[in-house]
Image (cartoon, grey):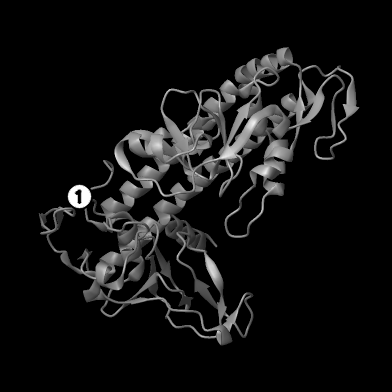
Amino acid sequence: MAKYQKYAEYKDSGVEWLGEIPSHWATCSLSKLFAIKAGGDVDLKNFSEDRSEEYPYPIYTNANNENSIYGYSKVANYQANSITVSGRGEVGFSVYRDHPFDAIIRLLVLTPQKECHPKFYAYYINEVINFRVESSAIGQLSTLQISPYKTVLPAIDEQKLIISFLDYETAKIDNLIAKQKKLIELLKEKRQAVISHAVTKGLNPNVPMKDSGVEWLGEVPAHWEVSRVGWLCEFISYGFTNPMPSTDEGPYMLTATDIEFGRVKYEGARRTSIEAFRNLLSPKSKLQAGDILVTKDGTLGRTALFDGDNEVCISQSVALLRLQKKIVLPEFLVRAFSGADYQSKIIFDAGGTTIKHIYISTLSKMNFVLPPMHEQKTIVDELKSKLTDMDQLIDQAINASNLLGERRTALIFSAVTGKIDVRNWQNPNTNNEANMELST
């Protein structure tokens, strides 16, 4: 933020987490500026899944996505120039709405009742307010909870200038983030393709091939075996279904969200007591070194190898594959499962509508191409070498995207709290348009 000027004078806002604000700004609670209501149940007589002239108004859901639409309505219960705020789950996601709409329950709607520009406060709510919601299970934010939160109150003209500045600057950042995400997507697709070719076609382009007899696998090396996942395992299971106590220390309890491709994210995992680990769990929920973990609910098919460094149990959202290590290397199967062919098959075989899941009985029957052990080792080593540079490029793109996101957050925070003065900022696009008009 060094390139931007500060205001000439500041004062204490009286709000600890807000700090100093420009001396000519005021503060007030959100309820002083907005009428705050919660969305309601959908009236089926006014509802349609598709938009039409008769059903023109979007019905927004509670999801943290500005385009999350439940359906369409004949009636707009909320006016344009309002804000929606997610009130359940990851609470506090704010979106400015410039059109009439309806909203389902658990989505809060803020409609201005005094002179202000809601878009300024959508920026403010997203990047300044930290809603500390106490809940034993799912975070919830009610109209009463959001009402007293403090906000700043610049003059309306200054709000509009800050909006113009942020719209322009965040659009540039968002475009760069989108390019990084596209690059990440392309690199991951290429990575999957490289893996898939190695684990289903081998490394020797001149080796004789045969029809695998499996449509989605096609031809495979003639000396390779076409097996099934279940035949390669001592057993396949999934984790505990009973409630488990949480503690600050003790064995880890892994869910699907704790598994990434190739690694376990212990940093975010819950823990349980050693007593509960020993007495409340069956052996099928406890891991041994060399076990393979596969996410079976939600985001499917993320696969990691357990190294045995910690005491760990798994929940029902994670499948456990304990392999017959004399015929298949765990590292080979982990690599294979992250390839395009196996990933596509896992997703194709999945059931469920809202939350996808794959049954372990289905996973057990999935075909698997099995090279001889020495070739498995060669393929694992070759892929490790080939993928190192690609993984570095992916990590660099992810880091770049994260840094851009952090810059976006810092820029918005600084502008809407008055840490930088953008009153003299001019939109370059406006100047270009004016110059073009003068030149014609």
Residue at coordinates 56% horizontally, 83% vertically from top-left?
A: 44
Residue at coordinates 48% horizontally, 77% vertically from top-left?
A: 101
The percent position of residue 128, horizontal first and vertical second, equals: 27, 55
Q: Give the tally of numbered discs.
A: 1
Within the image, what quadrant is residue 346 found in? top right
Question: Height in image: 338 above or below 316?
Answer: above
Three-letter amino acid code at disc 1?
Lys
Badge 1 marks a residue whose secondary structure is: loop
Mark 1 lies on residue: 6
Residue at coordinates 36% horizontally, 60% vertically from top-left?
A: 91
Residue 191 appears in the figure: no
In front here: 65 or 272? Answer: 272
Question: Height in image: 116 above or below 306?
Answer: below
Q: Residue at the front extreme?
A: 279
Instruction: Judge left or right: residue 430 versus residue 136.
Output: right
Instruction: Judge left or right: residue 219 versus residue 374.
Output: right
In front here: 276 or 131? Answer: 276
The quadrant of the image that shows the N terminus is top left
Instruction: Judge left or right: residue 167 versus residue 328.
Output: left
Residue 274 appears in the figure: yes
Q: Within 10 angstroms of label 1, few (less than 14), some, or many (20 or more) residues?
A: some
The quadrant of the image that shows the C terminus is bottom right
Residue at coordinates 59% horizontally, 38% vertically from top-left?
A: 237
In front here: 77 or 401? Answer: 77
The percent position of residue 62, horizontal first and vertical second, equals: 45, 66
The percent position of residue 323, horizontal first and vertical second, equals: 63, 26
The percent position of residue 22, horizontal first and vertical second, equals: 16, 58
